[in-house]
Amino acid sequence: DDVEATRFISAAVAMCSVAGAFCVRTWHRELEMLRENLRNFTLDEADCYDEKDRLVIYSGIISFMKYRGFCRAERSDREALDSFEELLRHSMGGKIENIIGYLGVAYEQTLIIGLPIQLIGFDN
């Protein structure tokens, strides 16, 4: 019967829409946490699996920053690390938005959210 089929489809669309909205909300919370972590990032508070590695990592960052010209060679090691933190804070936010889009909705999420509408289209 067409009325029952319409009710079933409407219920399915409603459930999928709620599930899609939940997924998008969760994704946006995670995205905002990532942005917040980038805004407040400091090397000294970053976790290292093994603290003995921290000095090796710092040395690599210092060499990179001075070699690539992000920090002048005569600057102190601490200034090179500070320059790295600033570079990370200011440049990575835009990179993330380039990867996942300004709205923060991934392609897969868009497909999942639009799936019920597509399925209804197949029935008609």
Image: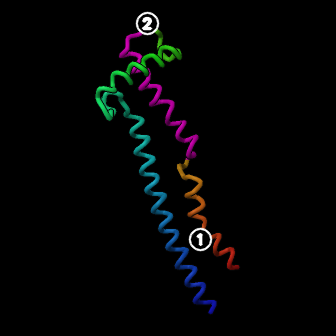
In the picture provided, is 82 more to the left or to the right than 100?
Answer: left
Residue 58 location, x and y as percent? Answer: 38, 22
Q: Residue at x 68, y 79 (%)?
A: 123
Determine crowd level at label 2: few under 14, some 14-19, many 20+ residues with C-alpha closer than 10 A.
few
Q: Picture quarter containing residue 48?
A: top left
The secondary element bearing badge 2 is classed as loop
Residue 60 location, x and y as percent? Answer: 43, 21
Q: Quadrant of the C terminus?
A: bottom right
Q: Is residue 98 magenta?
A: yes
> N-terminal of the two: label 1 or label 2?
2
Which region is colored magenta? 74-102
Residue highlighted by disc 2: 74
Name the residue furthest bottom.
1
Determine crowd level at label 1: few under 14, some 14-19, many 20+ residues with C-alpha closer than 10 A.
some
Q: Residue at x 52, y 74 (%)?
A: 14
Q: Quadrant of the N terminus?
A: bottom right
Residue kind at label 2, given as amino acid type: Glu
Residue 97 location, x and y as percent? Answer: 54, 41
Residue highlighted by disc 1: 116
Q: Residue at x 47, y 60 (%)?
A: 23
- Placement of 80 over or under 102, stated as above or below: above
Residue 98 location, x and y as percent? Answer: 58, 40
In three-dimensional space, the C-alpha distance between marks 1 and 2, rounded to whole angstroms, equals: 61 Å
- Placement of 1 over or under 47, stated as above or below: below
In the rendered structure, are the residues bearing label 1 and label 2 in contact, judged by CB atoms less than 8 Å apart? no
Residue kind at label 1, given as amino acid type: Pro
Q: Residue at x 37, y 34 (%)?
A: 40
Q: Picture quarter containing residue 26?
A: bottom left
